[in-house]
Amino acid sequence: MTDSLTVRDNRTGQEYDVPILDGTIKAADIGKIKAGDDIPGLAVYDPGFVNTASCRSAVTYIDGEQGILEYRGYPIEQLAEKSNFLEVAYLLIHGSLPTKAEYESWVHEITYHTFVHENVKSFMEGFRYDAHPMGMLMASVGALSTFYPDARNISDADNRHMQIVRMIAKMPTLGAWSFRHAQGKPFVYPDNELGYTANFLSMLFKMSEHKFEADERLVKALDILFILHADHEQNCSTNAVRSVGSSQVDPYSAVAAGVAALYGPLHGGANEAVLRMLRRIGSKENIPAFIQGVKDGNERLMGFGHRVYKNYDPRAKIIKKACDDVFEVTGVNPLLEIAQELEKIALEDEYFVSRKLYPNVDFYSGLIYEAFQFPPEMFTVLFAIGRTPGWLAQWLELVQDKEQKIARPKQIYTGDRRLDFVPASERWA
């Protein structure tokens, strides 16, 4: 027997049999429910799409109740421990793990596309000295569409592949240059002898030395952070990429929309808010008073809770372990002690446990970024570099999905109707 939902419309007394597939019902089936032939069918009102599936996807699986995150079926814990960012990027884009030959070809392609056109350099040098790095990244990613006009040919598989390689390769270059611009330092060109993450660190921090050599523990920790941020289902920025991409625009423009969405403090800026919170608490002795302030509604506990996860965010557990390696190199961030004590108290307090408020990925990531000596405005740039393969995997899925249509949500109109226009000569008399 087919799973279905029987809906009775009390306005008309008519019943409708609505099929259930994959735990969902089609909005079009709801649209067939009408009070009369000349009356529009029912629509679903869902601000923020909190219970609306906009697509079918095989990229990322999340079980928020159990705290499970998988890329293409592989647990995030295994990928963070045993893989590296470029292999994970290949997995997200192609849907399977690479053979040795495929991996070497993939790494070679990306390594030799890290350079950008010199005009991009001039473009980025034109920003104000105090331009926000995310604003620079958003603009420069969008600008790439003008350097590669062939990217508009999204129906060609080889062309799509080339744009994907270019974007994954060039994002660290653009991100590093936005960082250097803010510091008034000269831009550092990519070093093709270095791996993806080591090369990014070189472009960030290289000064007068002939060869920049980053500590391998730092390289590994940042690589893990990129993996953890690589994709996360239909979040705000991924939805933006898919929505803009549904117009069949080039992938640079679609990803620029993702960067723009990530720029917002409710999406990409949460780890910065965690650091501000920890600094405001100041010491372990002040934590009980802060906790009481949260319960009284006078404070906000940043870095806890998540729209999807109702359990401990699996990415937070991995980042917590990565902290040890980073602080072994950089020295312990004094805020770590406050964070650990705050987490301990919150996880034992019935107020937070009953509300399923557990640490999320942002709770510890800001501490690591700060240990790298990144200013807070760079945190979201790092997030964007890691998220790029996920955005592109979702875009690639979108353009090949025959069920997808241009995004065009309905609205509930709440304004005036049928007003009579009075000419200005009469209104102003």
Image (tube, rainbow, N blue to C red):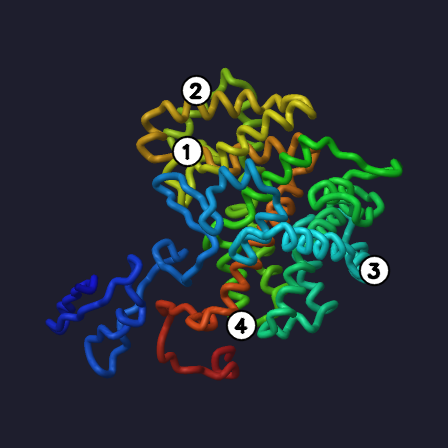
Which numbered circle lies on residue 118? Answer: 3
Q: Is residue 250 above or below residue 421?
A: above
Contact check, label 3 and label 1, Cβ < 8 Å = no
Q: Quadrant of the N terminus?
A: bottom left
- Tag 1: residue type? Tyr
Residue 74 at x, y percent in the picture: 47, 46
Q: Nearer the viewer, mark 1 or mark 2?
A: 1
Q: Residue at x 36, y 39 (%)?
A: 66
Q: CA distance from mark 3 to mark 4?
A: 30 Å
The secondary structure type at the circle numbered 1 is loop
Report the amino acid beneath label 2.
Pro
The residue identified by callout 2 is 288
| Residue 302 numbered tag | none
Which of disc 1 and disc 4 is earlier in sequence?
4
Residue nearest the viewer, comparing 405 with 394: 394
**Circle number at residue 247:** 4
Query: For numbered disc 2, what is the local secondary structure?
Result: helix
Which residue is at a point 82% across and 44% down the rendered structure image?
184
| Residue positioned 22% across, 67% down in the render | 18
